Image (tube, helix red, strand yellow):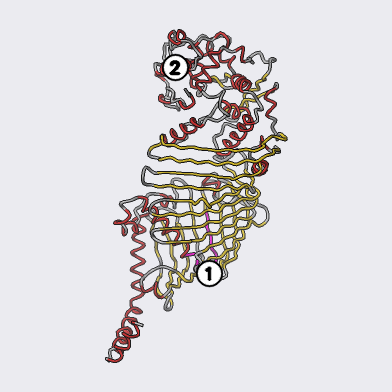
């Protein structure tokens, strides 16, 4: 209305035709210089990229094609003294007129001919490693008044730009032919090609060809990007036999294959101050292998997740409406991270009430092999509430809740845990290599009943390794909290908080590889044994003392007493028992605890005092026994010959501080 009034006044006063003349002149000037403008902008962008990344981008021609289209010919990118990273014969982009006037890149339609990306993975000759370095973002510099004061704002703004770019690019129409991505290094090569890719308002449907180390397979890819709804859907379907996705195993040690993978991303809000996304994904017949996760290939029949995520200047949040699904077993997920205020982190998981058998039926094939085929009845309700201020690791709050009703074992799976109550054989492995078999019965001359082992050894080991062994249910919450706190402080996996039952289960049934799923199986087995009282505490401890490693190729308490003291386990002194307890966490490191003269190093006295004080407070030893401790021992067995002059020896892989007993003190409960 206002604009119409302005035009009417201009027309009345005769100015309108002058306005039209001026506009025509501006349009003519724009058409005369538009190619120069585009070239200048292109060169400035290329210079910025080269300064930031060292990547030189060149084009043979660049300019306008028609009124709204910008084209570029023979575009390439190359780092100095490296192979060419990418090359495109011709690319053309159609822009909205408004975006064109304000020099914004929001493409309506894109044509690309023969795009080729060439990745060379040799460490000394890589042509893409520059991408993973730390670089100054020119857009962040432009917003320095907002972003430099807060690194979280920088990250939040970067995420916003990245998501916005994805939606901006995916909602355009595409016409791409002969796309090729290749990767090669000294012993591996793969090629991923798309002969033709067409997308429009109805979506796209194309086939990806993968050629990897001599094998060829295909993936059908279809989807739709809806600009009005800010919605992107993708579906990938393996054609024929499942094959691992290319490159992931080579670069990440991750093997992934599937029948069908679906993904939907919806932007509920996408602004500078707030990014709100809803992510729906599902997968059928997923095979997954990574040493960090499992020793075997994990097979998931079906699974998925719904994630409601919000990112703003105050926090990162996964809302409690989010769910994860593993073979039909579902759980609610909540996650919050506040980068300010001591970097607060919170995690909540809630399954609600479900039939207990559903848990064991949902366990993926290739995992939890000891539990395969198990039958149970009753219901389970599990929740976990975890909070910590990362700048104050001692603030750990951990509250797991497990409620069962009428739970019971109907049938053991592939492993009958009640067999621990009878005679059995235990195979010992070290670094995956078979060492020997230990027979747990009286036919083994080294097997010792609890009443044949000095109470000093029993009490010292229990106090040292699991102070609440006889009263806990296989888990020690304080130990877990302490372990989490220490791991945060040291920024590595330094503590596990394992109880004696957990250590025993790991030795008997599981590999020693530290991975996520092995730990989960350990927890489940411990819970079953303790919750169902399958094996008594005394029997668990008896087995534990007879199979654990006490030194190099020294297994069981009887061998340990002979190896160090040439004694029977029932004849060991209190000082000797404290020493035996101290080496359980580090059986192969015992020789680094001694001086050249055969005496224990001074820091061991603190360790002895710490454990003996606990034993005294619990009434395990008397005041006289405590006062008569010498805090030293003399080796009389074979171990004496193994002592070395540590002053002339290369330092061991664990530090002196760690050897000097950074013990899991949370296990030494009052």
Q: In terms of sequence position, does the residue under pointer 1 or pointer 2 come before the other?
A: 1
Look at the picture and state if 1 lies above or below 232: below
Q: Secondary structure at mark 1?
A: strand
Left or right: where does residue 390 sit relative to residue 323? left
Mark 2 Cα shell of 10 Å, populated few (<14), some (14-19), many (≥20): some
Could you say which quadrant of the image residue 264 lies in? bottom right
* Number of the label disc, if any, that sits on residue 613: 2
123 shown above or below 223: above
**Nearer to the camera, 533 or 128:** 533
Residue identified by numbered label 1: 175
- Label 1 neighbour load within 10 Å: few <14, some 14-19, many 20+: some
Position of residue 591 measured from the top left corner of the image (x, y, whole percent): 47, 18
**Outermost residue, right direction?**
411
- Per the rendering, the mark at residue 488 is none
Numbered disc 2: secondary structure: helix
Q: Quadrant of the N terminus?
A: bottom left
Q: Nearer the viewer, residue 503 or 139?
A: 503
Left or right of 265 in this view: 424: right
In magenta stretch: residue 172: yes
Pinpoint residue 154: horizontal percent, then vertical percent.
36, 53
x, y percentage for residue 483?
47, 32
Q: Is residue 84 visible?
A: yes
**Which residue is the extreme one toward the front?**
405
Q: Please give left or right for residue 624 compared with residue 288 in the image.
A: left
The segment highlighted magenta reads 169-182
Inspect the magenta stretch and tell me whether residue 268 lies in it: no
At 51% across and 61% down in the image, what residue appears? 266
Pick whichever, 326 or 293, lies toward us: 326
**Could you tell me which residue is drawn at 32 percent across and 83 percent down?**
23
Q: Is residue 112 visible?
A: no
Who is closer to the viewer here, 170 or 317?
317
Residue mark closest to the camera, 1 vs 2 = 2
């Amino acid at each position: 209305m206002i604009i119409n009034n302005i035009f009417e006044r201009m027309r009345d006063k005769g100015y309108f035709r002058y306005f039209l003349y001026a506009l025509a002149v501006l349009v003519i000037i724009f058409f005369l210089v538009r190619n120069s403008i585009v070239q200048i902008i292109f060169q400035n962008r290329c210079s910025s990229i080269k300064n930031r990344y060292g990547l030189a981008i060149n084009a043979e021609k660049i300019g306008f094609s028609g009124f709204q289209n910008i084209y570029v010919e023979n575009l390439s990118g190359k780092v100095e003294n490296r192979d060419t990273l990418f090359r495109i014969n011709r690319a053309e982009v159609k822009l909205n007129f408004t975006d064109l006037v304000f020099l914004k890149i929001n493409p309506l339609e894109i044509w690309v001919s023969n795009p080729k990306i060439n990745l060379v993975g040799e460490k000394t000759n890589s042509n893409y490693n520059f991408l993973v370095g730390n670089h100054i973002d020119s857009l962040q510099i432009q917003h320095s008044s907002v972003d430099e004061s807060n690194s979280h704002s920088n990250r939040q703004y970067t995420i916003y730009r990245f998501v916005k770019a994805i939606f901006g690019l995916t909602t355009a129409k595409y016409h791409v032919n002969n796309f090729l991505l290749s990767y090669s290094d000294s012993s591996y090569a793969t090629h991923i090609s798309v002969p033709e890719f067409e997308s429009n308002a109805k979506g796209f449907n194309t086939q990806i060809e993968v050629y990897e180390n001599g094998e060829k397979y295909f993936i059908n890819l279809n989807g739709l990007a809806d600009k009005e709804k800010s919605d992107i859907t993708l579906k990938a379907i393996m054609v024929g036999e499942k094959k691992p996705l290319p490159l992931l195993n080579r670069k990440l040690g991750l093997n992934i294959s599937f029948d069908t993978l679906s993904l939907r991303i919806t932007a509920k809000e996408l602004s500078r101050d707030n990014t709100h996304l809803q992510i729906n994904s599902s997968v059928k017949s997923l095979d997954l292998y990574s040493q960090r996760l499992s020793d075997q290939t994990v097979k998931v029949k079906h699974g998925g997740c719904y994630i409601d995520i919000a990112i703003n200047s105050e926090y990162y949040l996964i809302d409690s409406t989010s769910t994860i699904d593993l073979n039909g077993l579902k759980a609610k997920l909540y996650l919050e991270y506040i980068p300010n205020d001591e970097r607060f982190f919170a995690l909540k998981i809630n399954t609600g009430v479900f039939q207990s058998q559903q848990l064991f039926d949902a366990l993926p094939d290739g995992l939890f092999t000891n539990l395969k085929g198990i039958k149970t009845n009753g219901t389970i309700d599990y929740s976990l509430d975890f909070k910590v201020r990362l700048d104050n690791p001692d603030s750990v709050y951990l509250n797991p809740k497990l409620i069962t009703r009428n739970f019971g074992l109907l049938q053991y799976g592939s492993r009958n845990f009640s067999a621990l109550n009878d005679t059995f054989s235990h195979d010992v492995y070290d670094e995956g290599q078979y060492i020997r078999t230990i027979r747990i019965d009286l036919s083994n001359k080294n097997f010792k009943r609890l009443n044949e082992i000095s109470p000093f050894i029993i009490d010292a080991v229990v106090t040292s390794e699991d102070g609440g062994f006889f009263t806990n249910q296989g888990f020690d919450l304080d130990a877990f909290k302490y372990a989490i706190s220490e791991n945060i402080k040291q920024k590595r996996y330094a503590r596990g908080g394992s109880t004696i039952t957990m250590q025993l289960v790991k030795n008997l049934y599981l590999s020693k590889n530290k991975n996520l799923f092995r730990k989960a199986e350990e927890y489940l087995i411990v819970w079953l044994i303790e919750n169902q009282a399958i094996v008594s505490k005394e029997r668990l401890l008896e087995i534990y003392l007879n199979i654990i490693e006490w030194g190099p190729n020294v297994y069981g308490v009887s061998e340990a007493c002979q190896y160090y003291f040439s004694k029977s386990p029932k004849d060991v002194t209190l000082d000797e028992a404290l020493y035996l307890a101290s080496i359980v966490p580090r059986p192969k490191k015992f020789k680094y605890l001694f001086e050249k003269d055969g005496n224990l190093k001074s820091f061991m006295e603190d360790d002895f005092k710490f454990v003996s004080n606990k034993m005294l407070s619990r009434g395990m030893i008397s005041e006289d026994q405590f006062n008569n401790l010498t805090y030293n021992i003399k080796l009389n067995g074979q171990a004496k010959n193994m002592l070395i002059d540590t002053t002339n020896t290369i330092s061991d892989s664990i530090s002196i501080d760690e050897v000097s007993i950074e013990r899991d003190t949370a296990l030494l409960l009052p």
